[in-house]
Image: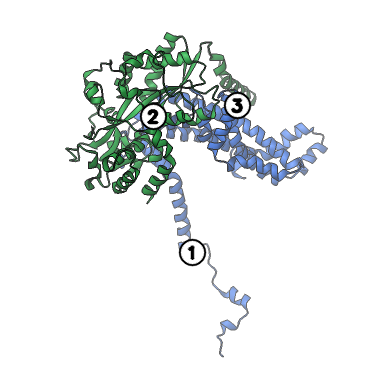
Chain colours: A blue, B green
């Protein structure tokens, strides 16, 4: 049987002689660009629709829009209920961020360094609120508060939000601790630094990206939290998502869109604010 | 001269954050007065606005109490989760179907004592009929909503909703979660079968309604009708009349077979520690002047026979015994006992 010259070459040589698809191929770049644009559209389209709805003067969703109006923003900012809900949501989100960050970062440090028995089980337990439907978490907490006869206090709401945001802080902090070089701490202590000083001047700056990432998640998850809040808000102290839900049962107009735009802008402002004050760029390196 | 604020130091930031936190948590306790508190549920929207602005404060002032209105759904699961001896609400305001479910679980008292609520003597019979738990303080009429600019004139019967010309512009509800949808299902049994409880006839009628656009909330249906996405739909009269004076091309049709009632019902919880105040509140909500104010704000038909509405409202709402006689009440007790089975079946119908 006759064979061709190329088929008689060793496999390695054949592979080496084959053309290698390179990054310079134009269709590959176009495909890459198209996929990225599609993902961006997928992510941003809902926001764009909300903005269009908020600026459209008609009291219902209409496409194409018939004009541009700020009437729904005026209605939103003139509403005492919405304003109260907005500020209350911000307050709860700030308190939740502080508590979840302190507890989550401390827990992550203990888990990473403490040589605790059953570490994996503890980590799984700490992440379990993410597995459970949040509405059940809200209902369970509500029943607990009822049993304790404490009503529906604001601290109870903050505790509920902390419970569901804690896993984010634990996870992101554990991620940076995983690659942490403990010799840096040992060096600081060898040079005479106390454990507390070592923590604040060596450990914390190095794990800051993870802690900050968790804090940002905690703020955003708390600010947008609906299922847990549904059972835990008290009359007169409703969060913005709960107020929006109650509102849309009766009035589905552009005020919902305006409130959503304000929420998006606020979340953006918080992230930018954290960048300016604490340094978000370090998170990007994560 | 105002002192200029310096840069935001870490210490100042922490102090401000701590103050904010303590203030937020402590505020409700600091602000709470010693007045007795009546805990009730209530709607949002215009109902909530007028309750907060006028009706609620007037009650608080007259009865020297604090009215705590929970307008965050869901009411029934919260009441279920709270203790029977110390319920989370003293008075529950919700629709009839939910009230029946609450009554079946013993969470609300099935009837209101007329001796403690004298205004009960003045309500239309439907408001305290055997189809009602507690008392219905208002009702809406569920009928057909239609566009007036699409040539759909002369509609008089429920059955016209099945006309093929409404294919693509017909509107209905997600029956498992919407009272109007549930009431309409019972109406289908009446229209095409032996009565409200003829579920087989109702299911067949629902099959024939397809294609239909279905929504969860009545507010969403209102907007679909306003935008023209829907041309003919099941809706309550308040959902159409509330746009009165805005030149919207929509109208409400009371079908000749009758309109379904969507009752606003008040009940008192058995474990309430504020029974006297709770009865006073129910009586207050049935006062002619309170009924008139609310009816003319939200376009609900008042339950008190003595209420005299302004001509504009009187012409459209159910304010006479003749008009009220058109109301068809749903047997919610019967419906709730079969709700799971009905939910499964209608989900299959509309999923297909």
Position of B49 relative to A127 (above/below): above
Check if mark 3 and mark 2 are on a common chain.
no
Residue A69 in percent (x, y) is at: 33, 32
Label 3 close to label 2 by CB (< 8 Å): no
Visible residue check, residue A215: no
Determine the residue positioned at 65% across, 40% down: A126
From what the image shows, is residue B344 above or below residue A166? below
Mark 1 crowd level (few <14, some 14–19, many ≥20, 10 Å Cα): few
Q: Which residue is mark 2?
A: B96
Q: Marks 3 and 1: same chain?
A: yes
Report the Cα–Cα distance between label 3 and label 2. 29 Å
Q: Residue at x 67, y 40 (%)?
A: A207
Q: Position of residue B65 (x, y in %)?
A: 47, 12
A286 vs B340, left or right, is right
Q: Which chain is home to disc 3?
A: A
Q: Secondary structure at mark 1?
A: loop
Badge 1 is on which residue?
Answer: A25
* Quadrant for the C terminus of chain A in the image: top right
Residue B52 at x, y percent in the picture: 41, 18
The foreground one among B55 and B116 is B116
- Between residue A114 and residue B345, name the one nearer to us: B345
Could you give the CA–CA distance between mark 1 and mark 2, rounded to whole angstroms?
A: 68 Å
Mark 3 crowd level (few <14, some 14–19, many ≥20, 10 Å Cα): few
Chain of the residue on which disc 2 is drawn = B
Which numbered disc covers residue A147? 3
Nearer the camera: disc 3 or disc 2: 2
Q: Secondary structure at mark 3?
A: helix
Instruction: Evaluate whether residue A3 shows in this view.
Output: yes
Percent of width and height locating residue A94: 57, 29
Quadrant hosting residue A76:
top left
Residue B345 is tagged as none
């Amino acid at each position: 049987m006759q064979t061709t010259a190329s088929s008689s070459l060793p496999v390695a040589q054949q592979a080496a002689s084959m053309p290698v698809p390179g990054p310079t191929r134009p269709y590959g770049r176009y495909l890459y660009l198209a996929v990225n644009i599609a993902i961006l559209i997928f992510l941003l389209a809902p926001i764009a629709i909300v903005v269009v709805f908020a600026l459209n003067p008609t009291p219902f969703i209409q496409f194409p829009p018939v004009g541009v109006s700020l009437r729904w923003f005026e209605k939103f900012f003139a509403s005492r209920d919405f304003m109260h809900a907005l500020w209350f949501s911000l307050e709860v989100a700030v308190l939740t961020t502080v508590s979840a960050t302190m507890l989550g970062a401390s827990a992550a440090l203990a888990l990473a360094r403490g040589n605790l028995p059953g570490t994996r089980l503890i980590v799984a337990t700490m992440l379990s609120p993410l597995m459970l439907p949040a509405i059940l978490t809200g209902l369970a907490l509500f029943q607990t508060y009822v049993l304790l006869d404490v009503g529906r206090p604001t601290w109870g709401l903050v505790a509920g939000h902390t419970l569901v945001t804690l896993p984010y802080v634990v996870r992101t902090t554990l991620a940076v601790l995983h690659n942490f070089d403990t010799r840096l701490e040992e060096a600081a202590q060898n040079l005479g630094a106390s454990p507390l000083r070592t923590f604040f001047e060596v450990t914390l700056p190095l794990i800051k990206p993870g802690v900050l990432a968790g804090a940002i998640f905690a703020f955003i998850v708390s600010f947008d939290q609906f299922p847990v809040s549904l059972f835990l808000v008290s009359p007169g102290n409703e969060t913005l998502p709960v107020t929006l839900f109650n509102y849309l049962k009766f009035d589905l107009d552009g005020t919902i869109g305006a409130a959503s735009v304000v929420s998006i802008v606020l979340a953006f402002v918080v992230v930018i604010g954290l960048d300016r004050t604490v340094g978000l760029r370090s998170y990007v390196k994560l | 001269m105002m002192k200029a604020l310096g840069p935001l130091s870490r210490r100042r930031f922490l102090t401000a954050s701590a103050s904010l936190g303590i203030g937020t948590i402590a505020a409700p306790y600091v602000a709470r007065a010693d007045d007795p508190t009546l805990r009730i549920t209530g709607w949002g929207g215009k109902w909530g606005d007028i309750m907060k602005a006028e009706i609620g404060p007037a009650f608080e002032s007259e009865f020297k109490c604090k009215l705590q209105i929970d307008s965050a759904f869901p009411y029934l699961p919260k009441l279920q989760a709270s203790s029977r001896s110390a319920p989370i609400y003293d008075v529950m305001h919700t629709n009839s179907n939910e009230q029946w479910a609450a009554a079946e679980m013993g969470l609300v008292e099935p009837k209101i004592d007329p001796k403690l609520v004298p205004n009960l003597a003045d309500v239309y019979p439907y408001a305290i009929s055997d189809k009602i738990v507690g008392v219905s303080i208002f009702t809406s009429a569920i009928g057909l909503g239609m566009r007036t600019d699409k040539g759909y004139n002369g509609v008089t019967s429920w059955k016209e909703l099945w006309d093929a010309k409404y294919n693509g512009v017909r509107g209905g509800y997600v029956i498992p979660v919407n009272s109007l949808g549930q009431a309409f299902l019972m109406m289908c049994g009446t229209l095409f079968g032996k009565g409200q409880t003829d579920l087989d006839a109702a299911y067949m009628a629902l099959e024939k309604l397809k294609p239909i656009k279905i929504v969860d909330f009545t507010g969403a249906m209102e907007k679909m009708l306003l935008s023209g996405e829907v041309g003919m739909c099941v809706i309550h009269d308040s959902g159409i009349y509330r746009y009165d004076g805005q030149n919207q091309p929509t109208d409400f049709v009371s079908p000749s077979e009758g309109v379904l009632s969507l009752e606003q019902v008040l009940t008192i919880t058995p474990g309430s520690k504020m029974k006297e105040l709770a009865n006073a509140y129910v009586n207050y909500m049935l006062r002619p002047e309170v009924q008139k104010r609310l009816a003319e704000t939200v376009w609900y038909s008042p339950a008190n026979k003595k209420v005299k509405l302004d001509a504009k409202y009187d012409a459209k709402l159910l304010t006479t015994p003749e008009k009220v006689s058109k109301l068809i009440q749903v047997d919610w007790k019967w419906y709730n006992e079969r709700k799971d089975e009905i939910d499964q079946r209608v989900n299959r119908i509309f999923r297909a």
